[in-house]
Image (cartoon, helix red, strand yellow):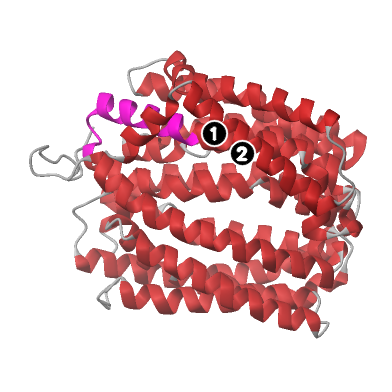
């Protein structure tokens, strides 16, 4: 495999553990500050906007995020992977993303017109120009954010995320209070993109070069194309449920489903996604040392699973409390959906960490093929279960994630000169402790009756936290945690 400037002498390089820990610290600090603000903002917006309005915006955001994949076309991870790109080549890539942004802004303007026909809802026509603006603004952030990731400067990236989401969230609440409806969510996203670009373009210190020499594509084209293919396939199968619900049911049903789905993805977003951005920049520096990558990744999954799996258990058992406290009684239909999706969340927490490993070893081609396999299985699972309504969609989505999990990890560890049992070895302790935690909480829920919703939630959070902490010390996993944190 081509080195890409990725081999570094061990004596001259910061250890993987120290460099990863530095990035993770700032990512976690920003992510968990952000999650507090996001939950508060979402809780307020859920009381000011209707499920139908959230449903319409859910479709719009699917389109916006899809456009981001097209404008990026795998360039962001390619910039991180290839260490020898010159300033002129970076400047040319930035100019290319601007042209891409303009072109796809026009394309997705007309796609919004097609949504009017597909969903038989003329309201989508009112949002076309603003979606085009979001698409273009998003394209401006691709190269600056890639440069900061490449430099493992997650302090700036995290700070930008928190400030952007906080300011745009408050702005969205003010607009929702003034009855702006869906436009409150759209204008919020526009402000977020503007703030993000302003901070990133300054802090990345990217020198603008008026250069349209696309010779860089010969260097990174294959890597970028395969990553782009995976990104598109992965994104489409992860969002096909939204389109099918909106098409065969209505935006109100989609609003109910999207709230449950979004809440289910909080552990993925604020655990897995909080940690995985560090993996590719750090591991790409030792991209030819598969043993080192495998050992590092096993420690990573073990540590993450010790936090993630018990969280999923608590979310599943306290689903009613979480939904009603955050969103109110008008979202009660999301509770059962949320419980089923929590099972999928436990699998997604691990699956979303695999892509950076494939990037690091330069095998985006394998990742692309695995993405196609996952896409086919997921679409079939959802379509087959669609006859049972939105609950069937949640069940089909969960079953598809179960089916595709083992093949994905078997291939990944084979590429790292290991086996699927290496993965099982890394998560066996957290899985066993989570089963014990489930038993403790089920017994407690049957023995203790509390009428107050908020008191009920915090009492059982306390019981679960105390029980799990005790289990960590009983099985001496605290030693492993402290050892990893000192790496």
The residue under the point 56% across, 37% down is 308
Q: Position of residue 35 (x, y in %)?
A: 58, 59
Separation (CA) of disc 2 from disc 1: 6 Å
Identify the residue position indicated by label 1 in the image. 469
- Image mark for residue 211: none
Q: Horizontal and vertical percent for residue 73?
A: 45, 54
Is 139 left or right of 320, judged from the image as shown?
left
User: In this rendering, would 239 be left or right of 407?
Assistant: right
Query: Looking at the image, is 56 positioned above or below residue 69?
Result: below
Numbered-mark total: 2
The answer to whether residue 107 shows anywhere in this view is yes
Mark 1 Cα shell of 10 Å, populated few (<14), some (14-19), many (≥20)? few
Q: Is residue 293 magenta?
A: yes
469 or 45, nearer to the observer: 469
Confirm or deny contact between disc 2 and disc 1 (CB under 8 A): yes
**Residue 465 disc label:** 2
302 or 213: nearer the viewer:
302
Q: Is residue 427 above or below residue 316?
A: above
Question: 112 or 450: which is nearer to us?
Answer: 450
Residue 67 at x, y = what percent?
58, 61
The image shows residue 439 at horizontal and vertical percentages of 71, 23
Q: Residue at x 51, y 79 (%)?
A: 194
Q: Principal SS element in the magenta part?
A: helix
Tag 2's secondary structure? helix
Residue range (magenta):
286-304
Quarter the C terminus occupies: top left
453 lies left or right of 291: right
């Amino acid at each position: 495999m081509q080195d890409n400037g990725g081999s570094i002498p061990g004596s001259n390089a910061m250890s993987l553990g120290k460099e990863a820990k530095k990035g993770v610290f700032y990512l976690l600090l920003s992510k968990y500050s952000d999650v507090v603000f996001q939950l508060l903002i979402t809780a307020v917006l859920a009381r000011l906007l209707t499920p139908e309005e959230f449903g319409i915006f859910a479709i719009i955001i699917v389109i916006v995020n899809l456009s981001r994949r097209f404008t990026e076309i795998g360039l962001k991870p390619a910039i991180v992977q290839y260490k020898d790109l010159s300033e002129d080549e970076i400047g040319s890539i930035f100019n290319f993303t601007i042209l891409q942004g303009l072109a796809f802004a026009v394309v997705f303007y007309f796609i919004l017109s097609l949504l009017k026909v597909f969903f038989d809802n003329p309201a989508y026509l009112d949002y076309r120009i603003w979606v085009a603006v979001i698409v273009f603004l998003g394209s401006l952030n691709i190269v600056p954010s890639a440069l900061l990731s490449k430099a493992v400067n997650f302090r700036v990236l995290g700070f930008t995320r928190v400030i952007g989401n906080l300011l745009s969230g408050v702005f969205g609440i003010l607009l929702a209070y003034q009855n702006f409806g869906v436009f409150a969510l759209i204008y919020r996203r526009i402000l977020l993109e503007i703030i993000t670009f302003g901070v990133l373009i300054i802090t990345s210190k990217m020198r603008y070069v008026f250069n349209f020499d696309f010779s860089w594509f010969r260097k990174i084209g294959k890597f970028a194309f395969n990553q782009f293919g995976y990104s598109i396939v992965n994104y489409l199968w992860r969002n096909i449920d939204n389109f099918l619900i909106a098409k065969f049911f209505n935006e109100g049903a989609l609003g109910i489903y999207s709230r449950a789905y979004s809440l289910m993805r909080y552990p993925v977003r604020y655990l897995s996604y909080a940690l995985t951005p560090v993996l590719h920049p750090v591991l790409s520096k030792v991209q030819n040392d598969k043993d080192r990558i495998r050992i590092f990744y096993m420690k990573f999954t073990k540590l993450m699973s010790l936090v993630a799996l018990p969280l999923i258990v608590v979310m599943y058992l306290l689903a009613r409390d979480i939904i009603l406290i955050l969103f109110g009684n008008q979202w009660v239909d999301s509770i059962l959906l949320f419980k089923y999706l929590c099972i999928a969340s436990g699998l997604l927490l691990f699956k979303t960490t695999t892509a950076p490993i494939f990037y690091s070893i330069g095998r985006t081609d394998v990742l692309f093929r695995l993405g196609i396999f996952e896409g086919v299985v997921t679409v079939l699972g959802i379509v087959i279960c669609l006859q049972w309504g939105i609950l069937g969609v949640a069940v089909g989505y969960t079953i598809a994630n179960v089916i595709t999990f083992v093949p994905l990890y078997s291939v990944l560890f084979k590429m790292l000169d290991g086996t699927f049992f290496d993965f099982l070895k890394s998560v066996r302790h957290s899985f066993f402790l989570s089963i014990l935690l489930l038993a403790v909480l089920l017994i407690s829920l049957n023995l203790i009756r509390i009428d107050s919703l908020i008191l009920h939630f915090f009492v059982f959070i306390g019981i679960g936290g105390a029980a799990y902490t005790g289990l960590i010390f009983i099985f001496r996993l605290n030693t492993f945690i402290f050892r990893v944190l000192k790496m």
